Amino acid sequence: MGSKPVIGTNLCKWTVSYFALAVVWLLLAEILMATGFGFPHDDIGGPDTLVIVHMVCVGWLSTVVCGALIQFVPVLVARPLYAERWTLPALALLTLGLTALLAGFLALGGHFNGPLWLLPAGAGLLIAGFALVVANLGMTLWSARPLPAPARFVAVGLACICVTAAFGGMFALVLSGTDLGAQWPDLLVSGVPIHAIAGLGGWLTFTAMGVSYRLLAMFMLAPDGDAKLGRLAWRAGAAALAVGVVGGVLTLWRATGLNLVLLVAGAAALLSLVAYGRDVLGLYRTRKRRALELNTRMSLLSLGSLAAFPILGAASVATGSLQSHAGALAFLVAFGWLTGLVLANLYKIVPFLTWLETYGPVMGRAPTPRIQDLVAERRASKWFVLFFAGTWVATLMLLLDAALGFRIAIAVVTLATLGLVEELVRARRLADVAEPLRLPAGAAVPRLLVLRN
Amino acid sequence: MTEFIDVDVRPILRAGGEPFSIIMAALERLGPGEGLRLLAPFKPVPLFDVMASKGFAHHEAELEGGEWEIRFMPDDGSFAAAEPAPAAMSDDWPEPAVHLDNRDLDPPEPMVRILASVERLAPGQTLSALLSREPVFLFRELTKRGHQWRGGFTPQRDAYQLTVRVLA
């Protein structure tokens, strides 16, 4: 056994603030969709749809993933975060940048008479915010080389958010009609697939896959020490993203061959997903915990959405309807897979952090409740069922081009999200902890939006 | 000359019992200037630090069959001068007084059990625990409480071995 200097991990103060702001963006996007704003009522590439897409992908998913990463990258690599003091300015930049960007889209859609510089200004602030997060996490990872498998997924994800943000910045220059943007007239047509692949695929999906290796192993009590675990999924996925992004940029420059690039990248991505599915199944089979907790069961449901994605995608390609089904496929990835996975894990992470914050100081000195005592799984499970059912029905309605059905399904999803948010607030307030154990001497009720560390 | 109270923990250990509380109870009953003679089936190294922290020096003698007689006496300086305490090397941690296998426990139960056991240790004593992963959130709590620790993965990388020492 080797002995080495060990450094601990702290609770990051602002993690729950990231979560809270992210959830606000999610609810806002859901309410807008339920009222019929954006796709499918509006054009899929129209400004109103761009408002929804960026609310969901930047406001909700990117913010919540950033919040989770500043807390859990240090756990993955057992090193402290490079600079905790950068986390609050990054959150402010991301929030401000997104607000300006959305205002820019709304002005572009003619909802109000805003200045054109809103788009590049918003993009600039967003790029600054992401740069701060990427630098912070990147330096943390750098200090921990050689990286364990889950952290290598995160490293690729960080590279991909840089690509996504760079393309987004260029789009903002084109859309706002600047002289610089006028030099790239075709950028929007062929650049959007790269922007979307790098963002949804590389940054959000690949990062979530990596972190889920550790989370699933932890919560199912499955051994994950095998160095080969996740290797094929990582190699194939990284290759898919490299081909998609580098090849995409090359074809953009040569103005030909994008379909071939997407085909090769798609094949590699499929191999990565299959390998990932095999790994998750392996963890499930070797788990020591027989009865799984709600968060793990719900994570598995979101994985079902991820598995349905290539099947639906292949069926759409085969029937030549990929173009018309692109919205449904993107919705399935953003909600069925990513939002479902994030909500399921927030349902564990928030009570876990709250428990550590509240009972850490008295651990071993006074009786404490279990983490499970901070939540009421029976009550929450109905919200999760409603969420996934609503999401899948909404996907189906998009496939069938039934706009009203989609809005009704989204209303159900919104209701379920509200229910889950209430459960998270109750966990922060220790509202479900039975009285004698709730607050032992030396413990204090946590604040809702900031962690005590 | 020091008067000794005898405590024989050999039958307790043979019956699978836990002698620590009995020794501590005997210690409570000692009068001023009195010492404790302990008979044990092995050399109770972890106890030496506990007793030292309570102001007792010790003298050890091996008996037949690998058993030991340890005489603890109030440390007024005279005894220590004649015979330096064996656990003088500051870098040398004593054998763990407690062993925990927390590999199959649900987080945060591994942490809770380690901290609960550490609370019961005497200054200078150590605890050893096997975990399924590196307990990154435990370290900040150990630091806050002023304990020292050493840890690392086993060569097969299938477990994390942690040793915690309560500050003497």
Image (spheres, coloured by chain):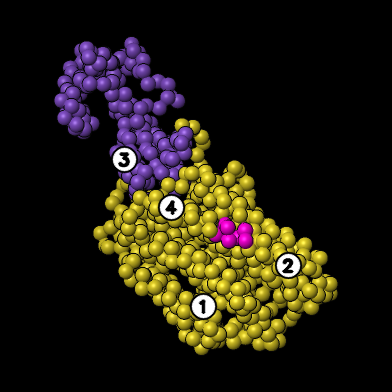
Chain colours: A yellow, B purple
Q: Residue at x 43, y 66 (%)?
A: A301
Task: Determine the CA span between mark 3 and mark 1.
Answer: 52 Å
Which residue is disc 3 drawn over?
Answer: B117
In this rendering, the label closer to the viewer, 2 or 4: 2
State the separation of the CA atoms marked 1 and 2: 27 Å
Q: Amino acid at mark 3?
A: Ser
- Residue wearing tag 4: A283
x%, y% of residue A197?
A: 64, 66
Residue found 66% across the figure and 87% down from its top = A111
User: Residue at point 80% right, 69% down?
Assistant: A255
Question: Is A222 above or below relative to A14?
Answer: above
**Tag 1 secondary structure:** helix
Q: Residues within 10 Å of mark 3 (few under 14, many from 20)?
A: some
The residue carrying pointer 1 sits among few (fewer than 14), some (14 to 19) or many (20 or more) residues within 10 Å by Cα, namely many
Chain of residue at mark 2: A
Secondary structure beneath label 3: helix
First in residue order: circle 2 vs circle 4: 2
Task: Kindly state the secondary structure of the residue where label 2 is placed.
Answer: helix
* Cα separation between marks 2 and 4: 37 Å
- Residue A94 appears at what percent x and percent y? 62, 67
Q: Residue furthest front?
A: A318
User: Camera-side residue: A79 or B2?
Assistant: A79
For residue A258, which numbered disc appears in the image? 2
Q: Is residue A347 visible?
A: no
Residue bounds of the magenta highlight: A267-273
Q: Nearer the viewer, residue A192 or A278?
A: A278
Q: Which mark is residue A395?
A: 1
Q: Chain of mark 4?
A: A
